[in-house]
Image (tube, rainbow, N blue to C red):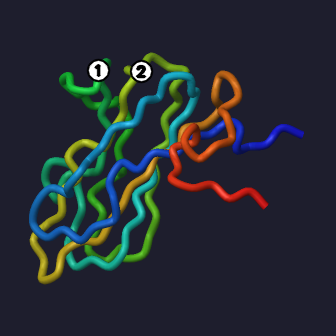
Amino acid sequence: MESLLGKVKLAQLVPPQLKDNGAFANNAYVDTAGFREALVILNVGALDTTIGSTTAAAAVKLEECDTTGGTYTDVDSAALADAVAATEDGKLFAIHLDLTKAHKRYLRINAPTAGDGSTGANMSAIAILGKAEGLVEQSATAMGLTELVTA
């Protein structure tokens, strides 16, 4: 039986952090080459304000680009219904993207931004790339991990 792990790669898009009134730091991209789907997950911790894209009131959305440092454009229909509300502590939010449709190679969250609260918003985001066109080597590096323990 083929392992599911031989078909996935993980990437940290936004490292875990607390942000109040501004853009989350270190918003990174993921290279989607060789994969047929992406699942971007926002892991929300304690908050007393909203989380959005570009502004804290806008829905979190994905954007894409042909190069790592080029101009990113919005991905059609790849947005949450609305901004993450200040009352949605401890929840997971996800956007699934079918990469078999016409998409650019690099993917990231559009300017994740926290609103102005007393404390702010705790969040991190990861991308899980799946259905690799070939097998992904089951090593920490190939899978986008620092360490992989296989038991």
Residue at 15% across / 48% down in the picture?
Answer: 54
Question: Which residue, given by chain and number where applicable, does mark 2 sit on?
Answer: 103
For this rendering, which residue is in front, 106 or 149?
Answer: 149
- The answer to which quarter of the image holds residue 2 is top right
- The answer to which quarter of the image holds residue 120 is bottom left
* Residue 73 position within the rendered picture, expressed as x and y whole percent measured from the top left: 24, 27
* Residue 43 position within the rendered picture, expressed as x and y whole percent measured from the top left: 42, 64
Position of residue 87 in the picture relative to residue 132 (left or right): left
* Residue 62 position within the rendered picture, expressed as x and y whole percent measured from the top left: 33, 39
* Residue 132 position within the rendered picture, expressed as x and y whole percent measured from the top left: 64, 29
Q: Where 148 sits versus 79, above or below? A: below
Mark 2 vs mark 1: give the one in front.
Answer: 1
Quarter in which the C terminus is drawn: bottom right
Question: Which residue, given by chain and number where applicable, does mark 1 sit on?
Answer: 67
Provide the secondary structure element on which disc 1 rests.
loop
Provide the secondary structure element on which disc 2 rests.
loop
Q: CA distance from mark 2 to mark 1?
A: 12 Å
